[in-house]
Each structure stands twice: as structure tokens, then as C-alpha cells.
Image (cartoon, grey):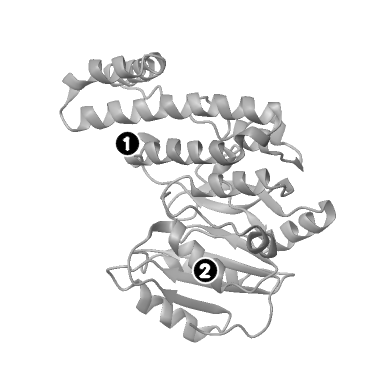
Amino acid sequence: MTEPLKTPDVSIIVAAWRCGDKIRPAINSALAARDVSIEVVVVDDASPDDTFEVLRDIAAQDPRVRIDRLPANSGPSGARNRAIDLACGEFIAVLDADDAMSPERLGHMMECARTNGADIVIDDLIAVDADGRRSEDRPFLKSSFFRQSRPIDLATWVRYNTPARGRDSIGYLKPLIRRTLLNRMGLRYDPELRNGEDYDLIARLLACGARMHFTAQAGYFYQRSPGSISHRLTPKHTRDWIEADIRFNNRFGASLAPDARRALLSRRRGLNDAHLFICAVDAIKQGRGRDLPGLFLKSPLSAPFSAGVLGKIALGKVIGRRIV
């Protein structure tokens, strides 16, 4: 592991896995940051391809790039935790290996943190395709609630991270987090989570008293994966969400304000709905459609949601137009 030249303003952490053919644009966008000093800490999650060789080549060309490699695959949470442990910056910024950011983004977010006394800052994002072109003309966050910058408390964070409710999801937004806060609170990503890990870490930080601010300026370029969410999620992902939610409630539930508890109750219902739907989709993909009645009977409160979405999908195929 190479050593930093000095203490930077921001440590940009990247979890890398099987991305040797596409990680250069992400790192180059981080290195192009203006008005802040940065380091880029990339941890290869035991990739079976040439990812680490590509990273060594990149690091040899710029001393601001520091690399490490895990001995065994541990998922994005494990790789990010290792990167956080190695980071030296005042702030940690999360960047996915297939995404990018604008040169002005980190400077604006640091100014937002200092102006508002925030420990965590999130900004809006721009959805792009694999070639970096905007895939939507509209902003990623559609609600008028996010047309202006504002503080985000735990209840708001939970409310806008509730699946199966049709709201904006701010869990996609990549945070800037004060590094000393993570160390002082002894918090890291949950290694059990390979999806939804940003939501969980920030929820725990907020429950511990961290201050968070949203800025409406969009500076993160998020590459949408092809296919719907049902093609990317598995029953294990959604089951892990529920188990993490249970752990959170066991630790913090009794001490939370009523609005946060209500938001968490609504989220749990949404998680149950999402889990049943993903289980139903998985059963259909595996040719086990006969299992659907049994799945629905085990989760009668979530069955109407799943049945309704599956019905819309079937109707869309009949009429040749995607409905959901």
C-alpha cells in the first residue's frame, strides 16, 4: 500500500471488483477534482481478472492513487471498510467503480458541509448510460421536496429509502462523510450487506447524532445497470435488508423520536413487500410458478402488492408496452 503525500481534504474510496476494463474513467474523474486536495483509495475485492494489474498501472502514474487488495472477496462493504481504514482525508467520499463525478462536486460538497455544520453531505445525481450520456432529461430526484438544499434527519432518510412505495430513493446518492465521525463512533459498513449498504451506514450515523445536509446541485454521474430492479436483486438481498433493519431497530428503536419510529415501521412494511415480490419473481424465473400461492399465503399483508405488480408486468407483455 502506497503512502499519502500529505493529509488531503477528501479521500475518495472505491471498491473494485472485476472492473479492470472500466475503472479508469472513474478514477480519472476523481483525480480531476478542483478546489480540494484529494487521494483516491482503491481496494480490489479479490478480483479474479486483471483488475489489480490495471490499478497498479494507474497508481504508478499518479501518487494520489493508493491501492490495496483483499485476500478474499468480501463484497463492497468489506472493500470500503478497508479503504476507510487506510484513508487519511478529512472527509470520505464514496465512488463506485463504474460511475464518475464532476470536477466541482467535492469542492461544493465540502463548502456545504462547513457552511451547514454537516457531518454528512449528499447531492443529487445524473443518470448516464454506459457511454456516459445522460439517460434521462429529468433530474434523478423527482419530488419538489428535493428542488432545494435542506437538512436531512433520520425520519426523512428512512422515509425516502422505503422500497415499494413509489417515492424518490435517496439511498442511491453517494455520501461525503467526515472521517473522524466514523472513527469516533466506531462505525463501518455492515459486512453482511452487499446491496443497500450506504443506507444502513448513514441510518446508524444519524441515529448516533450525526448531522446531514442535502444539496440540490447534481455532480455525481450514476451509470444505470441494464434491466429492472427485479433483474438485479435476489431474495438474499432483500432478506439481508430485513435482517439489517431488525438489527437497527434492536439497537436504536427505543431511543428514536416518534416520527423516525413511524418511518421505520413504514419501511419494514415496504421491505416485506419488496422481499415477497423478489421471491415471487425468483420462483417464476426458476420455473416454480406453482409455489406462488404458498408464498402469498405466508405473507398475506404483502401479497396484494406483489400480485398487483406481477399483474401489471403480465399486462404489459400482452399489450407490448412496459407498465412498471
Q: Position of residue 211 (x, y in %)?
A: 74, 48
**In the image, farthest residue toward the right:** 115
The label number, if any, that marks residue 139 in the structure image: none
Q: Which residue is drawn at the image coordinates 68% and 47% (left, top)?
A: 208
In the figure, residue 289 lies in which quadrant? top left
Q: Secondary structure at mark 2?
A: helix
128 shown above or below 228: below
- Between residue 41 and residue 148, name the one nearer to us: 41
Q: Amino acid at mark 1?
A: Pro
Residue 129 appears left or right of 281:
right
Residue positioned 55% across, 70% down in the render = 85
The local crowd at label 2, few if under 14, some if 14 to 19, many if 20 or more residues have their Cα within 10 Å, is many
Whether residue 302 sits left or right of residue 42 in the image: it is: left
Residue 152 lies in what quarter of the image? top right
Question: Closest to the observer: 129 or 1?
Answer: 1
Residue 35 image point, x, y percent: 74, 70
Spot occupied by residue 266 in the image (x, y as percentages of width and height)? 56, 24
Which amino acid, by three-letter code, is at mark 2? Answer: Ala
Nearer to the camera, 162 or 170: 162
Say which residue appears at 33% left-offset and 21% top-offset: 313
**Picture disc at residue 235:** 1
First reached walking from the N terminus: tag 2 or tag 1: 2
Residue 29 visible: no
Q: Which residue is mark 2?
A: 83
